[in-house]
Each structure stands twice: as C-alpha cells, then as structure tokens.
Image (cartoon, grey):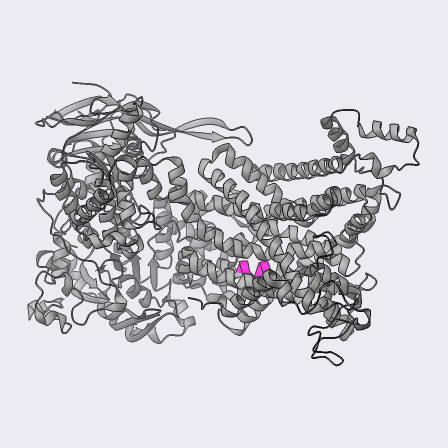
Amino acid sequence: MSTNSTIKDNPVVLQVEGLKTYFETRWGTVKAVDGVSFDLRKGETLGIVGESGSGKSVTMLSVMRLIPSPPGQIVEGRVLLEGQDLVDLSEKEMGAIRGSQIALIIQDPMTSLNPVFSIGNQVGEAIKIHQDIPKRTVLQQVLDVLRKVNIPAADTRVRDYPHQMSGGMRQRVVGAIGISCEPMVLIADEPTTSLDVTIQAQYLKLLKELQEASDIALIFITHDFGIVAKMCDRVAVMYAGKIVEMGDVRDIFNNPSHPYTEALLSSVPKLEEDVDRLYSIEGQPPTLHDLPPGCPFAPRCQYVRDKCSQSYPPQFNLTDGHYAACWRLE
Amino acid sequence: MRRLPLIPMLILAVFIATGIFAPLIAPHDPERGSLRERNLPPAWEEGGTTKFLLGTDHLGRDMLSRVIFGARISLVVAAVTLVVGMGIGVASGLAAGWYGGWIDEILMRVVDIKLAIPTILLALVLVLALGQSFMIIVAVLAIAVWPRFARNVRGEVLQLKTMDFVALAKVAGASTPRILFIHIFPGVINTLIVLATLEIGIVILLESTLSFLGAGVPPPTPAWGSMVSDGRDRLAVAWWISTMPGLAIMLTVLSMNLFGDWLRDRLDPRLRQLG
Amino acid sequence: MTTTTMDARPTADTTNEVLLEAEGLKKYFPVTKGLLISKITGHIKAVDGVSFQIRAGETLGIVGESGCGKSTTAKMLLQLEEPTEGTIRYQGKTIHNATSEERRAYRSSVQAVFQDPWSSLNPRMRVRDLIAEPMVINLDLSRREMQDRVAKLLEDVGLSSYHANLYPHEFSGGQRQRLAIARALSVEPRVIVLDEPVSALDVSIRAQIMNLLKDLQEEYNVSYLLIAHHLATVRYMCDWVAVMYLGQIVEFGPTRELFENASHPYTKALMNAALPSHPDIEQEEMILTGEVPSPLNPPEGCRFHPRCPFVIDQCPTAIPQVTELAPGHMVSCHLY
Amino acid sequence: MQRYLVRRILLALVTLLAVSLIIFVMSRAAGDPRHVYLDDYSTQEDWDRLTETLGLDKPYYYQYGIFLGSALKGDFGQSIKEGRPSMEVIIERLPATIQLGTAAFAFSVIVGVPLGILSAVKRGTFLDMTGKIIALIGQSAPVFWLGLMLVFLFAVRLDWLPPYGRQEISSIVLPAVALGWFYAAANLRLLRSAMLNVLDSEYVKLARAKGVSNNVIIWKHSLRNALIPVLTFAGITLGSLVTGSLVVETVFAWPGLGQLAIQALAGNDYPLLQAVVIVFTLMYVTAALLVDIMYAYIDPRIRYG
C-alpha cells in the first residue's frame, strides 16, 4: 500500500468496459452483471466487494470466459487484456490464455481440487499445457511452485491426494495452480472464507508476497471490508450487478459516498474499539430477476428521495478516480 | 422443469382401470376359446377380424381379453409386494439410520447379502422347495424390494439426523418418537414415493419373468409373462401371441419409469437444483 | 491465586445471579480401529477441562478456531452430548442426576440458535408449528394462548403475525434466523446458546440480527452464551470473553479489558490475524506458523507451545498456572 | 485399502454362507430330503444309508455341517435327472454361460459408456435422445420378451442370425444383446447423470480456469470421477446379468447354467438346482469383488482411506 504512487504509473494490464452478462432463467432474464467497467494496473490489487448475488463472481467468471452457456451469456462489453479483447477470442485461443495469463483461485478448497488425481498431477497440468518444457523438468517446476506457496515437505506431499491434506494446505495448492505459469492477472474469489483466522492470515500474507515478487495484478473478490483494508489498493463496491462506488481504498474508507458503502462500513463491528450500536441496514438484498426501476438500493436507503425510484443515477466523480452512483451527489 | 408426463399417466390410468374392472371391460372370456378360431391375427392384419382386436392364441382365446385380465395379476402382485416390502424397508431403514451402531451394521450387512443374491435364483429355490402360490411369489418379491427401500431410507435418515432442526428439537425436549415421526419421517416421504414408482416397474418385470419361467402365480389366471411364454414357439406363425402381452408389460413399466422420473425431478429438491 | 485449571468465573463488579455453571467439563471421543471387534486406540480430547459461569442478563463469548472445542462445549450445555467428565449446574443444581421435572425445567430454560438458518428450520413445518414446538413439548397452554404467543414472538423479532402460516422456504436467510430466535424465545428461557448466529448471513444482514439479539436481551432479560470465531462480533456482543485453544480456555476476562490487554500469545495472535477495520490500522506482524495440532495427541506442557513465538524453557514440559492479571482477567501462560 | 479389501472378502464369504444356509433350510423345509432320491421301491437299507450320509438322525446344525462340508468339496449330490454328480453336469455347462456373460458385459460397456458420456456432454441433442430411448427400452422391456422380439425380427423375418442354439459364432449375437441391454441402459443413465454432476463441480471449473481443453476435461477430469457411482452400482447390477442369463438361455436354448437351472426346476431336480445356485452366487460374488478392487483403484479416497 505504501507503493501506491508507483503503482499509479504502472501500465494498465486489464481493462473491462461496459460488461454485461445476462442469464436466461425460468423467471426471466437475470442481469447478473449490468454494465461494469474498471481497469487494473500491473502490481495493483483491486478489491471487488459485494454480497451474494451482487454480481462480483459472475464479473470475474465473465473475464475468464467461464460463464456456463446456456443459460449465461456475455451480451455486451469488452475485456481487454493488454489491449486484446478476450470476448472475441475462440474457445481454443482463450484456453491458451486461461491459466497462463489470467489465473483463478476459487473459494472452496474442499471442492476445488479433483479428488482422483494427486496434487503433483494437478499442479503440473497447467505447466504442461502452457509451457513447452521437457517432461522431466515438470516435476522440478511443480516442486518449485509448491515450495513457493510454503508447502512443507513438498517432495513427498506432491504425491498426496487432496483428501489427505487440511483445508489450509489445499488452499495453498489451489494458489500454487494459480501462480504456476506466472500470470499477469490473478483473480482470487473469496479464497479465505472457509479458513480459520490464523490460517487466513498466513494465506493473505503469502498472496501478498507472491504478488509483490512478480508484480502480479491481483483482483480480490470478497464480501469482507476487512480483507479490503488489509490487502487492496483500490475498491469497487457492487450492488445488484452494478458498481455503485469505486475509488482508492483510503478514499472509500474515509469518505464513503454511496449510501450502501457507508451503511456497510458502519454496520460491521470493530475489533479495535467499543461500538455502542451498529448501524443496521434494513431489508434484504434484491432478487435480480425482479428489479424495480431506478436505484436498486433505494428501498433500503436512509437518504432515499423521489428521484431514486425513477431513474438509475449516473456516476458522479468525487476526487481523482473516486466516483459513486447516487443522486445525493448531484 | 419437466412437463407433466401426460401420456404415461394416461397409460397408467388405463392399466389400473383395466386391472380393477377387467370383467366389465374384457369382450370375451379370457380362459375359454374355440379351437376353430385359433391363431387368428390382429384385426389390422390380413385375415384378422374385429371380433378379436388383437387376434387369438393357439387355443383360440381372445388376446385382448387375456391381456386385460393379465393386468390384474400384475397390479395385485405389485401392490401387495410394495406394501409389504416398503413396510419392512422403511422400518429397518429408520432403525438403522437413527440408532446406528450394531443395529445399523447388522441390517446393512443383511441388505448387502440380499443384494448379492440374484432374486430370480432365490425365487426358483423357494418355489421348488415350498411350492407355487400367490403368497410365496409375493414373499419372494417383497424380499427382493425391501433392501433398496431400507438403504435409501437409511441414507436419508443419516442426512436428516445431522440437520440442525433435529438437534433443536432435542434441545426443546422432543421425545425420540416425536423426532422420528414429526421431523424425520416426513422428510423421507418424497423419496419413498419416487422409489415406489420406480420399484413398481421392477416388481412387474420380476413377476412377469417368474411367470415366463413357469414359476409365477399358478394358472389358470392369465399372467402376461406366461402368455409371452405360450407364444414362444409360434413366433413364425402367430407373432402376436408373444408380442401383445410383452408390449403391455413394456408400456406399463415404461410409463411407471417416466412418471417416476418426473416425480423425482419434482419432489427431490437436490435433484431439482441440478435441473 | 494460582491453579492449573482455568475457571472462567466473572469475579469483578458483577452481582448478577449465577444461572448456569460448568465445572471441569471434558468430552473425549473414542477413536476405534479394527475390523470385526473394534478396539479403542485413543481419544480425541475435544474439550479438556473447561469451567465457566453464565450470569443473569449477561453475555459470555467463547472464541476460538475450528476444532478448539467451542461447539462441543455448547452441545454439552444443550444436552446433545454427554460430558465425559465434569458437571453442569443450573441455578446451583447439577443437571446430570436431575428428576424428570427438573430436566423439563432445564430444557425450557436453556434454548439455542444455530449457525445455518437453512438447516435449523424443518422445511416441512409451518412457521407457527415451528415456533410453537418447544411450547407444545414443555408448556401446558391452550391453542388460543399458543397462537397469541406465536403472534407476539413474530412481532418481537421484527416479522408479522401473518407469517405464521408460511413455510420456511418462503423466507430469506436473515428472516429465517429471526424465526429461529423466535422459536428459542417461545418458552421464555433464561439462557440462549448462540452458536455462530450471524456467520452464515449476508454482511448487510448481520447487524440487523446482532442488534435484534441485543434488544431482545434487554426485553426478555435473557443470558447468552455466544460461540464465535469472529473477534469483532464477540467484542460487540459480549460482556465476558473466553478464548479457547485445543479444548481448553487459555484466557478469560471482561470484554474490554481482554481486547485491550490481550495477554496470552494465542489471543494476541488471533487479534493480529483478524482483519483490520481501516487500511490505516497498522497490525503487528505476528503470524502463527503451522496448523492446530490434532486433539488426538495434544502437545505436552502448554498446548500452544509448538506454535508460540514466545516459547520459554518450561513451556514444553510444565502445564502453565493461571494468573489473574487484572480483576477478572485470567491467563494461563508461563510468561506471567 | 487393506481394511477395505478384507471387509469386501469377508462380505463375499458371508454371502456364500448365507446362500448355502438358505438352500439347506429350503431342502429341509420341502419335506423329508430322502424322498428326493428314494421312492417306494427303495429298500430299508437304502433309506438307512441315506439317513446316515445326510446325518438325519443328528441335530440340524450337524446336518448343516455335513452339507457345508460336502459343498466345500464340490459335492452337491447326484442329479436326479442326469443320474450323475451335479457338479459334473455344471462343469460341462459353465463355459457357455461365462462366454455369454462376457459378451453381454462387453456389449453393455461398448454401448452404455460412450453413449452415457456423449449424452451428458451433448445434452438435448439427437445423440442424447437416442441414448434416452435405448435406456428406456432397456429398463422397461422384460429381457425374455426383448429376446423373442430380436429373434422374430433378425432370425424369423430378416433371417440374418440364427434364432437359437450355440452352433455358429454368430449365435451369440442375439442372446448377448438381449442380456446386455438392461445393463447397458443402467450404465448409460448412471454415467449420464454422474457426468452432469461432475461437469458442474468446482474442480472442473478450476481445471477450465487452468486452460485445460474441453476434451481433456471430459475424458480425464470428469470420466474417472463419474465412473465412481457407476462402479458402485455395477456390483449390484452384475446380479441382473446372472438373473438375466437364466431367462436368455431359456429363450435362445443356450446350453449354459441358466438353462440347466430351469431344467432342474421343471424336473424337480433339487440337488442340481442347489448346485447351480451356489455356482451362480460364487460367480457373482467373484465378479463383484473384482468391481470393488477396480473401484479402489479409481478412487484414491478408498485406496488410502
């Protein structure tokens, strides 16, 4: 985080523009991602914060072109990786990019490894696909990567199967798969939600070190502002398929400008101080197939006004790179 | 979600109705025929007559009437077998799943052993040793179906047992019978319904196989399986004698299976999620 | 005062009546091996000598990571698990050899709310039957009284009386947790065990439920035992906090004192591992290495010593004494 | 792994024991077992000799011991109809049954496995529909009727294949198809739904994120996992092959054990029938054990469990 000023000068590696991903369901069209734009620089960590159903995971799956189709489809927008639009690529071309230039770490370490193959096999697979190296050296590289993610006794554990490892160790293996081909962009989808606090701290530290070692651009998908505070340079807050506020991490924490961001921040209890009473956001997150017109947060908003239920607010720029979509800022 | 399986349901309704009202529907006596009218082809074939829509067999008996009366045997055997087999299966499945420990161990080993003994073989041994009767057939078939009920109910109970609402019922002081009948059993009913529809098909197939082998419900009542057997050696001259009752078996079982699949999609929430 | 067993007994400035008391609670699960005749080859010491008190109208929090024994402790209080050793006393009377009348009284005095709002409501029962079940079992009420009570409870937890006719699947996660709370309150218990009551909920819903629980505590004068892994939640909700590691309480104290003067190395590590609420908060770099050892063979001496950054000579061999650092603030560590 | 295998072998032995017990109990329940061999013209001496061999003057458990002892030696008594040891008759017929069973099994795998995979991968296409129809017929049509219909179509009407017997190599085609169809249908359905489950899993998602191509995902990552439920069921379905062979051998006059069993039944030849039942069970139990070993090979959670 102290390297903030230098990161701002880094080149942009990933650019998402007006991304829309819709799902056709029994209840109608679900606009899971509805016009999302952001960019990401080399070595930067972007946090995408939202609750279940906010579209944060679908955004990242769209970037990776992993949306199951049918029922899902990217209907609009561009995803530029170093200027190349991923949305237009063929499945084969995309396969060459996945895992080598953009990699993914999925959230559940218990189910994201194939139970019938050894750890070594699963880490080695990505290396074999993307790197043209002789078979003998694959094992060596697998061991290197496993050591990078601090797996003790890597040379014996490489033959283990997932069920022989603890949750924390499995998550490290998933991390190892992610970094095995030294990607430019690494997407971490809530990789620590099921881990214990002390194991989570170990893992976050590891991710930070790996990122700094090779200037990876990291996207952290989470529902926890604590992770954002600890890990991220910039934040995008998502609600009902749209980014409602985005900015530098300090701007967001010091000056939350969208009522949803503000409400979320003040509804979380603090470790460092006594809080007499938390702010409580009333109501429920909306269901996406039945969105009211206007701002979807309006029914739960403490500052709601007439205009809010009529049309969706545009982005209002606050400071450099900090914007929010709320009529209150008009 | 899948559409309502209308045609299968219609076929099942016809099957059940003919089973119950056979004497009212059947145009002829299924057990009496005239040798002068033997091996007549179905009405739409050359030489066929509308008097015998599906033709006659080698003894001149009306195929249609025999098929209609055959539904009766299948229906009764299937119903009685299912009630008995399901009862034993549910009771043992509940006990094994709820109490666990040695009760579970013993019951599940019995199930394993039962599943390891081919049903028809067991049936043949029993029939040869004890003689051929309705009771024996039902007993054999019930022995064949209960393990699957027991196993599925047990699995379901094991899963329900870990649900928090069961723990909370205990916290509230609910007695074991209360938990079993108010919290566990209702959770098993859907599985039972689905399994029953699928097992009926298996029971009908087993019953017809026994009849075909001459070890089924004893004559004179016509059973579909023994009717197929009657036509075995006459395929070249009167193909319909074997074909018609076999078709009846297949349509019935097929409809049961389609209906069961549809029910499973509807009632089993875990499968429903998979779409 | 020095003993080797931690007694999480509020001593400082509280005069509230002691409702529920656990003393030397242990729960060992046998580990068996063998094909036909199984032999017990060891024990998983899930809970290994835990004592604490819950006083009227107060909240005691138990924090720890998975496998520390906090949920097993809760289960023993709820009589879902039989303790291997130790006693549980309710209003001074042991519950293990209680008469059936006393057992009944205990059951309606101690209720629970669990983590998973999807699994804790029977999907095949209507809301009114769900909420009324503890009353049906334990109280002698007329149909009418029962209905009125369900309606009042629904309103108390922020729902409406018309919800009584619905089934659980018609509610969202937060609303289900409200239903679970209403059910727990239906027999007017004195103590409610809350096992991770908000961790399965969406972030924006958590504060609703925590505030509701606090309000109901006032209204019903009920005590809570809160089991949680999230430290900030514990700080917000509790009057007293006990930190558990490998089946034992390692530190205990009044919430504020404990959070501001955390003394046991494990407590410190937990706090440092917890996520900050603002990017400017600098955290001490104190990341534990390794994972929690197996409760099958817990380490000798102090159970935390293999992972402890401050380990000294006696840690691997001697069981640490309990030291009172401030009124009511106790720690079990050789450093003090 | 060892523990798992020992358990399986023990279960197989217990199963055999249970079957032998059922047979023994039935042989006694049917009445005086001496009536099976002797009639009114037999001498008192004959009766006495048989009483002694069968231990009829001793308690039941002792009689069972005798029964079990001779069964272990392969001695199930004289076949009534053939007038020679039952085991001798069985050994003559065994190759034909094994041949038919193997052919039917091969058919079920060749048809069921690829179609199961393809109908999951190409869901909703023509292939999926074809698979569905094959599965539905296989699970709904009685095996004996299916056999007769095959005979009617391919032997009587088209005259492509011999209708019965075991004279030519082509004789095996129709019975193998009739017998294997049910099993093929079971494989197909199970594999299809298992594949659909696996393709939906997190680890397949992660494999895709690694850049693994679709083909490798299907054939490497998914198939092996999808085979686990198929194999679980295979142990049970193998029994249906045995059951089916009784019927199919009867329909096609295939000179194997199944036909023998029916002949024994028709001829009230209890000694022969009990021997056939034991041999069938033995075959089934061995096959199921092989499946269990394969299962452990595929699923490391069992191998290192």
Spot occupied by residue C124 in the image (x, y as percentages of width and height): 35, 50
Secondary structure that dominates the magenta span = helix
Quadrant of the image containing the N terminus of chain A? bottom left
Looking at the image, is C159 positioned above or below residue A316? above
The structure residue drawn at horizontal position 54% and vertical position 58%, both measured from the top left corner, is: D190
| Residue A238, picture quadrant | bottom left
| Residue C262, picture quadrant | top left
Q: Is residue C196 visible?
A: no
Quadrant of the image containing the C terminus of chain A? bottom left
Q: Is D189 included in the stretch rendered in magenta?
A: yes
Spot occupied by residue C108 in the image (x, y as percentages of width and height): 25, 34
Which region shows up in magenta?
D185-191
Find the residue positioned furthest to the bottom. Answer: B46
Q: Give left or right: position of D68 versus C300.
A: right
Instruction: Using the image as rendered, state which of residue D112 and residue D268 is in the foreground.
Output: D268
The structure residue drawn at horizontal position 90% and vertical position 36%, both measured from the top left corner, is: D40
Q: Is B198 included in the stretch rendered in magenta?
A: no
Q: Give left or right: position of A175 versus C312.
A: right
Instruction: Using the image as rendered, state which of residue A267 and residue A167 is in the foreground.
Output: A267
User: How many numbered discs sit on the rendered protein?
Assistant: 0
Spot occupied by residue A89 in the image (x, y as percentages of width and height): 37, 74
